[in-house]
Amino acid sequence: MTEYQLQNPPTDGITSVHFSPNNQSQFLIASSWDCSVRLYDVNQHTFRHMYKHAGPALDCCFPDPSRALSGGLDRILKMYDFNTQKETLMGYHDNAIRCVHYSPEINMIITGSWDASIKFWDSRVPNCLGSCSLPDKIYTLDSVGELLVVGTAQRKVSVWDLRKINSQTPIENRESNLKYQTRCIRCFPNKQGYVLSSIEGRVAVEFFDPNPEIQKKKYAFKCHRSKDNGIENIFPVNAIAFHKQYGTFATGGSDAFVNMWDGANKKRLCQFHQYPAGITSLAFSSEGNMLAIASSYNYEYGADLQLAPNDVTKNNIFVRRVSDLETKPK
């Protein structure tokens, strides 16, 4: 069986899925608008545990195989230990926490909020190490090595050095090459750049090195679009996930499709079947042999579900065993 659904999925929109790190990809966590963070055993296909926030949980991650971090509309950063079933309040933001990220290289937790700030936290004890203000609310962030890339409203992108978190100044401020709102940013595993997606069926491939020769390599492409009776339907690209070993990446859109891309050779490797609802989050296991796919209604057609093309009310997490044929550059 190449793909299966996890039992006992969240009961509202799924905001994020993550595999446990360090080649122990037995566990998967998922955060949701139903205020829960759920733990699954992907080998046994079973639901293991759940803890709750006081409001919708917008993001989650694993700092290590036994603990989860999460944040959301209750403005609280929580750490939960699945072994002891104890939760720790790590700290707060002044508005919803949109992004919760752990940097293994720096051993630091990074949160991004709608209060237009990023905060840095000690992963061992509840301690805020620093905070930086940005021009607008944070929608997405990712790090690779010592570099942090943050995407905010108004299509702004900033690059930060995680070794200098108290400088208050990014290494670089950029503007997205895409004309519409930024949805997701993920960094290349080789530390050369990042991939950025927008609400308008487009993805941009960007490079850190300011050398004009390197900057010539950047490009953008259209994806997650369909033609229907001569009318082009354009969908948001909500999720990006990199295959750490091969450097290829998956994108998930509100068209309910997942595509695999070879960014270096500007090629689409494959497209998986259509899922029941739009793709809201994607995550590869650390070994690169599994892809978690969150399929949830993201209100692309508004609150009236009659306008949606199929039964989008179900929230599902699929785990797909991916092959080299699907993920390896050709």
Image (tube, grey):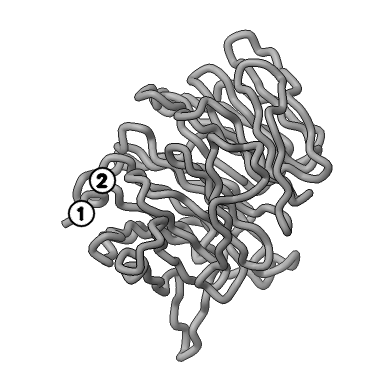
Residue 296, numbered label: none
Give amino acid for label 2.
Answer: Tyr
In the depicted structure, whether residue 192 falls above or below residue 65: below
Which image quarter: residue 112?
A: top right
Which residue is drawn at the image coordinates 35% and 38% (left, top)?
290
**Which is nearer the eye, 137 or 270?**
137
- Which residue does the numbered mark 2 point to in the structure image? 246
Which residue is drawn at the image coordinates 57% and 48% (left, top)?
141
Split into 4 quadrants, where in the image is the N terminus? top left
Residue 85 image point, x, y percent: 66, 13
Residue 192 image point, x, y percent: 35, 51
- Which residue does the numbered mark 1 point to in the structure image? 329
Q: How crowded is the residue under tag 2: few (<14 C-alpha within 10 Å), some, or many (20+)?
A: some
Q: Helix, strand or loop at disc 2? A: loop
**Which is nearer the eye, 189 or 250?**
189
Split into 4 quadrants, where in the image is the C terminus? bottom left
In the depicted structure, whether residue 274 falls above or below residue 110: below
Which image quarter: residue 175?
A: bottom right
Q: Helix, strand or loop at disc 1? A: loop
Which residue is drawn at the image coordinates 53% and 17% (left, top)?
66
Using the rendered image of the protein, determine whether residue 277 is visible from the camera's viewpoint. no
Residues at discs 1 and 2 in contact (Cβ within 8 Å) = yes
